Image (cartoon, helix red, strand yellow):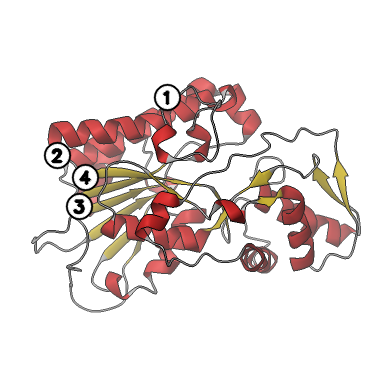
Amino acid sequence: SSFECVKPSWVGIFVWPLMAGYGKSESPTVVLVTGGSGLVGKAINKVINEDDAAKGETWVFLSSKDGDLVDRNATEAIFKKHHPTHVIHLAARVGGLFHNMAKKVEFFRENMLINDNIMECCRIYGVKKLVSCLSTCIFPDKTTYPIDETMLHNGPPHNSNLGYSIAKRLVDSMNHCYKEQYGCQFTSLIPTNVYGPHDNFNVEDGHVIPGLIHKCYLAKQKGEDMVLWGSGTPMRQFIFSEDLARLIVWVLRDYQEIEPIILSVGEEDEVSISDVAQMICEAMDFKGKLVKDTTKADGQFKKTASNKKLRSYKPEFKFTPIREGIQTAVDWFVENYSVARK
């Protein structure tokens, strides 16, 4: 089989008794992770391999080659093969700003189909808990800051990614519908900007940190200036992929609400793009000049999200400091340059 099925190497089946929704069933725990070969999926894989609670569980990490989740029959085949008891749903049709703007219909339709197939299969095949990953870009365009979970449906999202955003928002709506009608335990989480090893480091279409890491690498190789697009003044909250992975596993095990939860560093940890670029240059030991191309657009100045709800549950959770996380991501990229997505 081409499925990347990761079973921790311990012998015997042990059902972790404290997991939310695990009940008294003796059936072994099988956690299916869609989009399992990406940035967040790889981080979850690393985290659960170091997690004693996962010793008797089977974790199945799917990639796109294992079946097209847009196709209902292909999705059903995956559920019939693996009999998951729990699902972490990371898979989505994603793209950068310009791709999103040009293909709104495709982004809406494909994500709607993927999400509908996953949710309905979870219902039909008796999955005990489904955790879906949303995105902060789905919040209303016109809003007050900081954003919190109660504001999700308070107005239309930004027009640039309307198709994607509406499809993602409807996951939250349907979580409530499935709970009311069928009693399903479906919930969702909303991370801020994720970065780390195994990211997509494409300069044109990647996200801020991986794109800048690749740019800095090339500038260092060629002995050129490192060019930052825009003024560098916009502020963002970044979460290291392994921190997010630990929190997603916590949501799966212990978070009982249907309402979504924002997974983010605090408001006080917001950093400017300019500071991030500087940290990347230092991590890469880049000695050239960092210059700003202010003819390029900046995007939104800030999108501050509140993590008060998360902190009410996990007051002691320690986030990886951004400088340390960037160093890890840079080191991974340099060591894995030939195989990294770029």
Q: Where residue 109 is drawn, which disc sits there?
A: 1
State the image coordinates of residue 342 (x, y, percent, origin top left): 66, 50
Of residues 250 and 311, the one drawn nearer to the viewer in this rendering? 311
Q: Who's the residue at 49% across and 22% down the image?
A: 156
Mark 1: amino acid: Arg
Q: Going from the N terminus, do you reach mark 4 or mark 3 first?
A: 3
First in residue order: circle 1 vs circle 2: 1
Cβ atoms under marks 4 and 2 closer than 8 Å: yes
Helix, strand or loop status at disc 1? helix
Sooner in the amino-acid sequence: mark 3 or mark 1:
3
Task: Answer with left or right where residue 224 lies relative to residue 242.
Answer: right
Which one is closest to the eye, mark 3 or mark 1?
1
Q: Is residue 183 visible?
A: yes
* Of pointers 2 and 3, the one earlier in the residue sequence: 3
Image quarter of residue 26: bottom left
Does 17 appear above or below 35? below
Q: Is residue 278 above or below residue 87?
A: below
Q: Label 3: which residue?
A: 83
Q: x, y (%) of residue 112?
A: 38, 28
Q: Label 4 to label 3, Cα distance in Å?
A: 17 Å
Three-letter code, disc 4? Gln
The residue to which callout 2 is attached is: 183
The percent coordinates of residue 196 (x first, y second) are: 58, 59
Q: CA distance from mark 2 to mark 3?
A: 19 Å
